[in-house]
Image (tube, grey):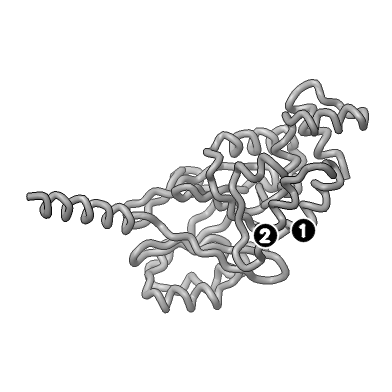
Amino acid sequence: MINKIVHRVLFHMEQEVLSLLNVKQFRYGADNLGYLVYGLKKAMVIDGGAYKEMLGFIEQKELNLQFLTNTHDHYDHTSGNSHFLNLPGARMLSYESLIREKEIAIEGKKIKIFNTPGHTEDSVCFYVDNILISGDTLFNGTIGNCFTGDLAGFFQTVRNLMTLPAETIVYAGHDYVKDAMLFARNLEPDNVNIDIYLRKYSPDHLFSTLAEEFRVNPYMRFNDDGIVALLRKRGLPRKTEWERWQSLMSIE
């Protein structure tokens, strides 16, 4: 009887593990990062600039490409799209379809879609289990440029992402870590977390958690006493969250 119970528990645990989706990071160009989300047999490409490596991985794992999509429509993220469209069953997901559907299912496992305007009007992030594929909205250590000019909208996007669990892993669209930490150190030279963050940094597998971002990323630290003191010293507006964030965005 005990053996049967153990067998059922182990089988249930195995099924739970098999139901999880994997996320593999691919580096291409000078600093771009793209992603393959996959299960046992099906996969989705997000920002497929590293198309040769991704196609090789898909073939090696004997995966079927179900979806192809992008975090936004800038060419450095969409440049690989055409190389996947001839694969049997591959479906291109546009920004409009992503926002309309709000989630994607691969092998029964849901991937949430967040509409995150700011960097561009069509920016989206993908939330897979505890992983945030954030494109050029949120980088490791900084945020993207606000090409829309809508700072208030971008601020709301950042605040929304900050409500995710602290253990959320951030997989960004570029590797700007070294420059980001130079800027962060210029603002907060006594922040010891910056050294810890840099010691963990690896260009071969770039990630951070939201908890780590809250300790080093100035654009997520607008409520921190040290940042408020910095803004006071510089004579910048700081009364509200919005004023503090806008002031941070003005610093070069």
Q: Earlier in the sequence, mark 1 or mark 2?
A: 1
- The residue pinned by badge 2 equals 201
At label 2, the amino acid type is Tyr
Q: Residue 147 in the image: x percent, y percent?
A: 75, 47
Q: Judge left or right: residue 166 versus residue 228.
A: left
Pointers 1 and 2 in contact (C-beta within 8 Å) = yes
Look at 80% across and 32% down and name the residue there: 226
Q: Residue 204 in the image: x percent, y percent?
A: 62, 68
Check the image and name the residue furthest to the top: 239
Residue 72 makes an appearance in the image? no
Look at 74% across and 49% down and name the residue there: 194
Q: Residue 88 in the image: x percent, y percent?
A: 38, 72
> Which quadrant is the C terminus positioned in?
top right
Q: Judge left or right: residue 29 versus residue 64.
A: right
Instruction: Tell me if mark 2 has few (under 14), some (14-19) or many (20+) residues whose alpha carbon lies within 10 angstroms of its own.
Output: some
Q: In the depicted view, which residue is nearer to us: 149 or 26?
A: 26
Instruction: Tell me if mark 1 has few (under 14), some (14-19) or many (20+) residues whose alpha carbon lies within 10 angstroms of its own.
Output: few
Q: In the depicted view, which residue is nearer to us: 11 or 170?
A: 11
- The residue pinned by badge 1 equals 178
Where, by quadrant of the figure, is residue 211 drawn?
A: top right
Assign a secondary structure to mark 2. loop
Look at 74% across and 32% down and name the residue there: 222
Assign a secondary structure to mark 1. helix
From this view, report whether residue 226 is shown above or below residue 181: above
At label 1, the amino acid type is Lys
Look at 72% across and 44% down and name the residue there: 216
Q: In the depicted view, which residue is nearer to us: 74 or 223?
A: 223
Check the image and name the residue furthest to the front: 2
